[in-house]
């Protein structure tokens, strides 16, 4: 993401906790927007998959985690933060996809 036009202070430029909190709050809003888009992809997956057993794909989970860990290393994010966050995110997205899959087919 390009943050060059973002008004929040850079972490290295923060001199007060108020500035730190302003930056964190702004990032949280961005994360929510990105996660909402990710959820919409889960909704699309639920619509596209014809077999409920296809919702959980263990090989895909491990592929996603491996890619996230590599991206974390490249971005300077601790893998100790990235991996458990994504594993939790993936599990919650799978639960959401199951719910969406079932809802789409409840009258079928």
Image: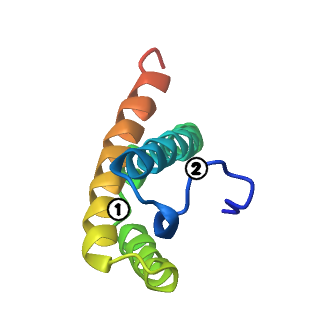
Asked if residue 45 lies left or right of residue 22, the reply is right
For the residues carrying marks 2 and 1, which lies nearer the camera in this image?
2
Asked if residue 80 lies left or right of residue 20, the reply is left
> Counting other residues with Cα less than 10 Å from the Cα at mark 1, is it few (<14), some (14-19), or many (20 or more)?
some
Q: Which mark is residue 86?
A: 1
Q: Secondary structure at mark 1?
A: helix
Between 99 and 5, the one lying in front of the other is 5
Q: Quadrant of residue 63?
A: bottom left
Mark 2 or 1, nearer chain start: 2
The image shows residue 79, relative to residue 56, as above or below, that is: below
Asked if residue 47 lies left or right of residue 5, the reply is left
- Quadrant of the image for the N terminus? bottom right
Q: Is residue 47 visible?
A: yes
Tag 2–tag 1 contact (CB < 8 Å)? no
Q: Quadrant of residue 5?
A: bottom right
Q: Is residue 105 visible?
A: no
| Residue occupying the point 46% across, 14% down | 107
Q: Which mark is residue 8?
A: 2
Residue 89 picture location, percent across and down: 34, 53
| Residue occupying the point 49% across, 45% down | 35
Residue 82 picture location, percent across and down: 34, 69
The image shows residue 86, relative to residue 102, as above or below, that is: below
Residue 80 picture location, percent across and down: 25, 75
| Residue occupying the point 59% across, 43% down | 48
> Counting other residues with Cα less than 10 Å from the Cα at mark 2, is it few (<14), some (14-19), or many (20 or more)?
some
């Amino acid at each position: 993401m390009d943050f060059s036009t973002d008004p929040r202070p850079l972490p290295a430029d923060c001199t007060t906790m108020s500035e730190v909190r302003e930056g964190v709050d702004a990032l949280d809003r961005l994360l929510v927007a990105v996660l909402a888009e990710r959820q919409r992809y889960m909704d699309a997956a639920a619509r596209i998959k014809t077999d409920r057993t296809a919702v959980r794909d263990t090989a895909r989970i491990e592929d996603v985690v491996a890619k996230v860990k590599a991206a974390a290393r490249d971005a300077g994010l601790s893998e100790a933060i990235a991996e458990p966050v994504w594993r939790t995110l993936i599990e919650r997205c799978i639960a959401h996809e199951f719910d969406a899959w079932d809802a789409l087919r409840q009258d079928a």
